[in-house]
Amino acid sequence: MDTGILYQTDAWVIALLLFVLMLISSFIGKVAGNHIRKKNPEDEKTTETSSLIALLFFLLAFTFSMSGDRYDSRRKIVVDESNIIGTAILRSDLYPDSTRALFRKDFKDYVETRISYYKVGPDTKGILKADSLSQVISAKLWKRATTLSKDPANLAATQQMIPALNDLIDVTTSRLSGEKAKVPESILVMLFFLSMIIAFYSGYSEGLKGKIDWLVQIGFCLLVSLVILFTLDLDRPRRGFVNLDVPNQTIIGLRKNFE
């Protein structure tokens, strides 16, 4: 799992820090602009920042879209996993009662491990432990199904169960890989520096004119910080405001199959 500094730090802390740094950059830019204006009062100089701001907003939109797409992908995988597990549970009914009971016992344990897989939250060790336990149980289910497949009496049941178990094993790998896929930290760092640089030039441009509208500057810095906040939040489904609690209810709902 990702253990980078940015990932370990709460999104709101990063957004707040960026907001403060952008305001400081704006102030430094204003001071620099005032100094240049006072040094050469007869020269009328202006700095065009609209193209830089357009570039920043384009990159913010691109990064936000990237996070949104990955969030939707993770949500879809959770629902798919629930459907796959439910299908495998139902196909255990194709076996004789004694074998069916063994399958359902293991499926019940498997469902509990997949529930705990999400409930551990951002705890990396807990995530890997729950994932490893689910792999152990799925291997046990696979071994039982392949052993039973050697009996011609179980041919029809095996033809239904094997594909379901294969999908069950594959989807756990897809889910874990989906959680590891995040917006590269290099892109986020670039956005942070670009935001501060543009804030500096914005303050510098206003300083050259001899005045600065701090309401506009604060609004700009706040807007950029909020976009980055929600971009980070979408990329962290186990923490923050946007999570996968609703999709995971579909897996928790599988418990009713064992009542």
Image (spheres, rainbow, N blue to C red):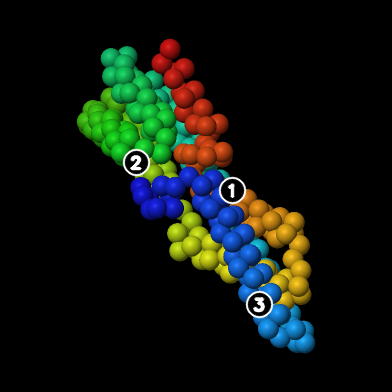
Would you name the residue on which mark 2 appears? 124
> At 46% from the left edge and 39% from the top edge, which residue is drawn?
238
- Other-residue count near label 2 (Cα within 10 Å), few / some / many at <14 / 14–19 / ≥20: few
Q: Nearer the viewer, mark 3 or mark 2?
A: 3
Quadrant occupied by the C terminus: top left
Q: Earlier in the sequence, mark 3 or mark 2?
A: 3
Report the amino acid beneath label 3.
His
Would you name the residue on which mark 3 appears? 35
- Other-residue count near label 1 (Cα within 10 Å), few / some / many at <14 / 14–19 / ≥20: many
Q: CA gap, disc 1 to disc 2? A: 22 Å
Report the amino acid beneath label 2.
Thr
Query: Against 21, is 48 above or below?
Result: below
Q: Earlier in the sequence, mark 1 or mark 3?
A: 3
Would you name the residue on which mark 1 appears? 230
Q: CA gap, disc 1 to disc 3? A: 37 Å
> At 76% from the left edge and 62% from the top edge, which residue is drawn?
213
Question: Residue 210 placed where, x, y %?
Answer: 76, 73
Q: Quadrant of residue 186?
A: bottom left
> At 48% from the left edge and 56% from the top edge, which residue is drawn?
183
| Callouts 1 and 2 close, C-beta under 8 Å | no
